[in-house]
Image (spheres, rainbow, N blue to C red):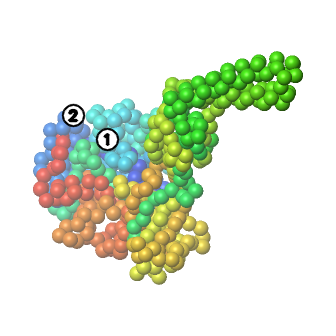
Amino acid sequence: MTGHNSPKLLTFPLLVLAVGCGLGLAVLSGCESDHDRGGHSHGGHDDHAGHDDHGGHDDHGGHEQAGAPGHGHGHGVEGGLPGTTITDFSRSPADGSETELFVEFGPLIVGEETPFAAHFTDCGELWTAVGEGALVVELSTASGAAETFEVRGPSVPGIFRPVAKPTTAGLRRLRFHLARGARVHVHDVGEVTVYPTRAAAEKALGGGEEEGDDGSISFLKEQAWRLDFALAEVKKQAVSPTVRVFGELVPRSDGRARVTASASGRLVAASGGLPQVGAVIGRGTVLGTLVPSMSGGGNLAAILLQKEKASIAASTAQREVDRLTSLVEQGAVPARRLQEAEAGVARAKADSASADRLLAQYQGAVSGGRAPGGIQIVAPIGGVLTDVPVVAGSYVEEGEKMFEIVDTSVLWLVARVPEIKHAEARKVFGGAFRLPGGEWRDIVVGEGGVSPSTVLDEADRTFPLRVAIENADGALPAGAKVVVDLAVAAPRVRLAMPASAVVYEQGAPVAYVMVEGESFARRPLTLAGEVGGRVLIEEGVQAGERVVSTGAMYVKLATASGAAIGHGHAH
């Protein structure tokens, strides 16, 4: 919206407000505002017809009676000449951040100083005062010749005070350049007139008294900066009819692995110890070593007994071999007897070696060191360790669970469609789901859509619908319960805005719309439903308008109390 509203009267120099705004409905396929930087509105401002000393802002003493409907900064008329107010939005090409400019100023006259009291607000998730940067006010002709007036920083956070003193008269293009390093926001607010003399300005503008109460709500930038406050643009959105159901985020069927003991034995940790619950591991990671026991045993006494028996048997067998050797040489016994005795020695030595290995395995398991003859335990999938019910050095039985791993890189969204809604949700073309913290995420499906199961789950009388959800960053929690809006028909364009912008007053939905920088209007709404955290609007607001999406209750309180909430400085 370009062009000046009917001018209002000011008692002091121009006030500029620029607000960096990074808001918007990311999920909307929506339309841009009035121009490619977000649009602006010009106009006289009943509440801002003039500050008693708005060029100052040296302190934050407090407005008088700010917050009452129709009441503003107590502006009057300076020399009988009305002033102008402008609200504008601009995005920086460097990072896409948005700023809002709200400016008030008196008439521009050759040779006379016109001060600007400029408020700049950064509009990220919350709107906050700009605390640094250089502001240049540019007055340019159609041929490109320009006069510039600069201030190197704010006098207090959010408030800049450039002063313009034009040298030539005529139509000029008015631009505001806010520079913070690589981030530059240019607010092109259209044409203004520079008058050759004050008499010419008086003749063109005429005198006048302040206009009466227009019913608007004054909520000052200084108030908003101190609170959790933000606006969002009303946009046109391609929206499908939806069915709301409940669901859950669960791992895929092949995304959960239980690692069990392949044999009875002792679990030996690597040098860094066993991995802990919550650790992210890759496929093939060595989780530990399993040292199998002999015949299901594994206690130290049994191993030592086995070693002692093997040693005695070896000694006895060797003595028998020595005795039979001389007898065979004398021909007193057959050679077969000597061969059997030698075989007994070999068996005894094998038993002794086996006992030695078991003892080494046991000692390795107890000390946590390398376990000779152990079986490496390897992660079959990558993911998050969700259960480690064993400790290093413990004895585990064959088949006992040692680790559980869940792959969360892709989750299933399981939406539970009640049987009474099955016919309505027979084909689903997308939608959104809401996490427990309130954040909404889009559901993306193929062009042909997806369908819920045709087999009823008798436990809860629902038909499950499964959709794969990418979760490469791990931000989505497996097992979370979610609210799901399923798109069940072709989309059509509707007006939409965040559900947080709706305030219910005596059961009726209303929104608070910014009329210009510090003025708001209460608008009753006719709603047409809610989709993915956004409400659909039949009546009450228009595309391109900005509504209070965070902090609407503060504006409502300003209406009810007739006094400023968190009110700031004296003008």
Is any atom of residue 296 visible in this view? Answer: yes
| Local crowd size for mark 2, using a 10 Å CA cut-off: few (<14), some (14–19), many (≥20) | some
Is any atom of residue 233 visible in this view? Answer: no
Which quadrant does the N terminus fall into?
Answer: bottom left
Measuring 82% from the left and 20% from the top, which residue is drawn there? 327
Please give left or right for residue 108 compared with residue 564 in the image. Answer: right
Measuring 18% from the left and 42% from the top, which residue is drawn there? 568
Q: Which residue is mark 2?
A: 58
Q: Which residue is mark 1?
A: 129
Q: Say what amino acid the circle numbered 2 marks.
A: Asp
Give the camera-side residue of 74 and 38.
38
Measuring 59% from the left and 45% from the top, which residue is drawn there? 262
Give the camera-side residue of 485 and 303.
303
User: x, y (%) of residue 57?
Assistant: 22, 37
Please give left or right for residue 302 compared with residue 75 in the image. Answer: right
- Relative to 75, say whether 371 is above or below: above
| Local crowd size for mark 1, using a 10 Å CA cut-off: few (<14), some (14–19), many (≥20) | many
Please give left or right for residue 178 compared with residue 126 in the image. Answer: right
User: x, y (%) of residue 481?
Assistant: 39, 60
User: x, y (%) of residue 370?
Assistant: 59, 27
